[in-house]
Amino acid sequence: MIRLAKKEDIPRLQELLEQILIVHHQARPDIFKAEGSKFTDKELEAVIGDTNKPVFVYEDENGMILGHLFLMIKEVSENDGPQKPVKTLFIDDLCVDEKARGQKLGEKLYQFALDYAKQLGCYNLTLHVWDDNKGALRFYERLGMKPRYTEMETILK
């Protein structure tokens, strides 16, 4: 079952966020720390309460949270420069517990986000994925996503 996250879910969300950090650290240790979190508990509580940044969790029949989906509703208005007005649903974070992978839970979370975007009347569903995260790239390409743009870098140190 996929449901909105609650304050009581914060400890489990922190565990899943740590798993994501480890994946990012392994791919880019020059950028990502080996431990820590994207949010403090207090920040996470604020995100959970923000209707423009809904957080959903995938919960099994025993009440165990096996994955999460952090979303952001982004809107470009007519007054925002040369771009046409557009409403986008951005996947800020999609995670399936490492012990629950291979059960198509990531696909279920992605499909949920896609359906949610359609319900909101969004033009598109977007996300960022690190180029070194080959597994995530394959996963999203298999689901039909295509690159929107490429950000390049030159490391100076």
Image (cartoon, rainbow, N blue to C red):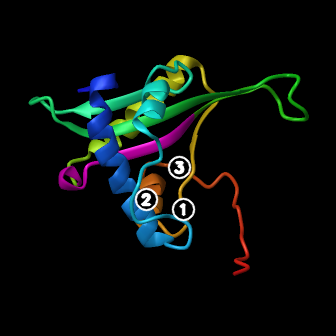
Label 2 sits on a secondary structure element that is helix
Q: Place residue 21 in its image quadrant.
A: bottom left
- Dot 2 amino acid type: Ala
* In the foreground, 51 or 32: 32
- Residue 6, percent from left and from top: 32, 22
Label 1 sits on a secondary structure element that is loop
Q: Image point 27% across, 43% down: which residue?
A: 105
Q: Place residue 123 in its image quadrant.
A: top right
Q: Is residue 141 left or right of residue 58?
A: right
Q: Is residue 82 left or right of residue 76?
A: right
- Residue 48, percent from left and from top: 43, 25
The residue pinned by badge 3 equals 145
Q: Name above or below for residue 129 compared with residue 76.
A: below
Q: CA distance from mark 1 to mark 2?
A: 8 Å
- Image quadrant occupied by the C terminus: bottom right
Q: Earlier in the sequence, mark 1 or mark 3?
A: 1
Most extreme residue toward the left is 62
Q: Image point 48% across, 33% down: which residue?
A: 43
Q: Place residue 120 in its image quadrant.
A: top right
The residue pinned by badge 2 equals 136
- Residue 112, percent from left and from top: 39, 30
Q: Earlier in the sequence, mark 3 or mark 2?
A: 2
Q: Residues within 10 Å of mark 2 (few under 14, many from 20)?
A: few
Which of labels 1 and 2 is toward the front? 1
